[in-house]
Amino acid sequence: MTARPAKEQRRVVVTGVGAITPLGLNCEESWKNALAGRSGIAPITRFNCEAYDVKFAGEVKGFNADNYIPKKEQKKMDIFIQYALAAAKMAMENANLTISPEMGDRAGCIIGVGMGGLPSIEEQYTKVLEKGPSRISPFFIPMVITNLAAGQVSIAHGLKGPNYSVTSACASGAHSIGESVNYIRNGWCDVMVSGGAESTVCPMAIGGFAAMRALSTRNEAPEKASRPFDKDRDGFVLAEGAAILVLESLEHAQKRGANILCEVTGYGVSSDAHHMTNPAPSGAGAARAIQMALKDSSLQPSDIQYVNAHGTSTPVGDDLESQAIRSVFGDHAKKLWVSSTKSMMGHALGAAGAIESVFCILALRDQIVPPTINLENPSENCDLDYVPHQARKGNLKNVLNNSFGFGGTNATLIFSKL
C-alpha cells in the first residue's frame, strides 16, 4: 500500500483582536496603559471583603453590557460570557468581518474558560438557602457552564463550525488559540474566533486562592502587589477580563483584502506530570512546551526577540520559568526581552493567555515591548532582561507567549511578523 502524501498545512494569520482587561475596556486603551506601566490593581469593589485576608484584585472597571448585549439577554449570562461577547464583537469589527450563511460551516469558535460562572453559582446558592429551590433562575445552568462563552459567541456571529470551551486552568486561553490554529492549518475551517474569558473576583475565589496561600496579601499597596521576578513577591493577584482573536487562513484573509496583524507560527503543549500546583523541577515541562513551539514554527531560539512570560509573581513559578527560558535559549537568553504584563493587571486565569497574546500581537504591530513594573530587586534565580519599569522599542519579528496552569499544563504560542 502506498502512503498518502502529507497534506501541506495552511498558514494562519490574525486579522482582528478585541479585549477587556483591568487596564481598559478595549484593546487600545489596555495597550496604552500597559505601555505606560500603569497598574489596574486596586481594592475590591464587587463585595464586602473586610473579613478576607486579601482585599484587592484586578477588576474590570466601568464595563457596560448594554453596549454589547440586549438587556433581556444579559440575565441569561454570567459576566464571563458577557465579557466574551463584548471582546468577540470588538474583534470581529476590528477584522471587518461578517460571517455570511455560506461561510458559517467553515467558521468556528473555541474560547477558554478556567472556572466558569462562579459568581452566579454563589448568587443562586444564596437564593436556595434563603428562599428555597423555587427561586433558582431558569437560566442558572446556561449562565455558569464554561462552554456557553463559545456558544453565545457562535450564536451571535453565525459560527457553525466547531464550538466548544477549553478548560486547562491558566493555560485555557492559550490552548484555545492553539487548537483553533490547528483547525485552520488542517483545512477544516477558514475562520476561527478564539481566546479566553474569566470573571471570578468573588468571595469563593478570593477566599479559596487565599486559603491555598497563592495570593499576594500586600493590602496596604495593591498596585505594587503583583511583582513578577522580584525577590519580595508573595503571590499572584486575581484578575478578570477577556480577549478574542479572529484567526483566518492566509489565503482567506488575502482574498477578502483583510488587514493582517501577524501570523501564528508556533504552538507547543506539554504536561509536567509532577504535582497538582507546583511546576516540575527546573521548569522542565515549560521548557518542553517552548521547544515544541519553536519546532512547530521552524524557528531557532535566536529568532525570538521577546517573551511575554507567564510570570505570575509566585515565589516558585517565576524562578522555574526563568530557568526554563535559560535552558531552551542558552546564550541567547541574555539577549531576550522578557516581561510579565501580569505585573500591571494581575492574573486573569483562563483569560490570561488570550489577553497576553493580544499584547504580543500589538507589540509586533507597534514594535514596542510592555514593561514589567514593580521589579525593584530581582531574585537570585531571575537574571534575565525583564524590561523593568519602562516600555522598550525594538526590532521585533517573532514573539513568544507562555501560559502554564494548575495540573501541570503548559502552552506556548509564537506570533510572527508577516
Image: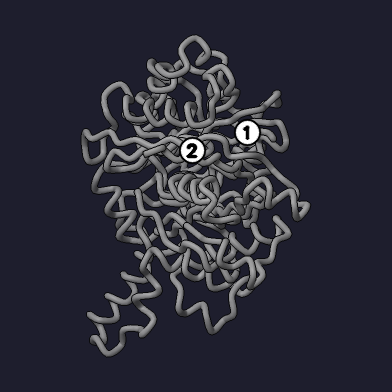
Q: Residues within 10 Å of mark 2 (few under 14, many from 20)?
A: few
Whether residue 339 appears in this view of the structure is no
Where is residue 202 drawn, in percent x and y? 37, 61
Q: Quadrant of residue 229?
A: top left
Taking the spot 27% from the left edge, 29% from the top edge, the residue there is: 280
| Residue contact at pointers 2 and 1, CB within 8 angstroms | no
**Which quarter of the image is occupied by the N terminus?**
top left
Assign a secondary structure to mark 1. strand
Residue 205 higher or lower than 365, as above or below: below
At mark 2, the secondary structure is: loop
Which amino acid lies under the numbered mark 2 shown in the image of this protein?
Pro
Q: Where is 138 relative to 179, above or below? A: below
Horizontal side of residue 354 vs 275, given as left or right: right
Position of 66 with respect to 1 (left or right) is right
Residue holding disc 2: 5
Q: Return the residue nearer the eye: 375 or 160.
A: 160
Residue type, label 1: Ser
Name the residue carrying label 1.
416
Pick the front one: 208 or 262: 262
Query: Residue lying furthest right in this view?
Result: 257
Q: Mark 2 or mark 1: which is in front?
A: 2
- Give the residue displayed 59% in from the left and 43% down from the top: 10
Q: Position of residue 126 (x, y in %)?
A: 28, 76
Q: Residue at 35% of width from left, 78% of height from top?
A: 140
Q: Please indicate whether residue 173 sits to the left or right of residue 52 in the image.
A: right
**x, y (%) of residue 216?**
36, 40
- Between the residue at mark 2 and the residue at mark 1, the CA separation in whole angstroms equals 28 Å
Placement of the C terminus among the 4 image quadrants:
top right
Left or right: residue 387 compared with residue 330: right
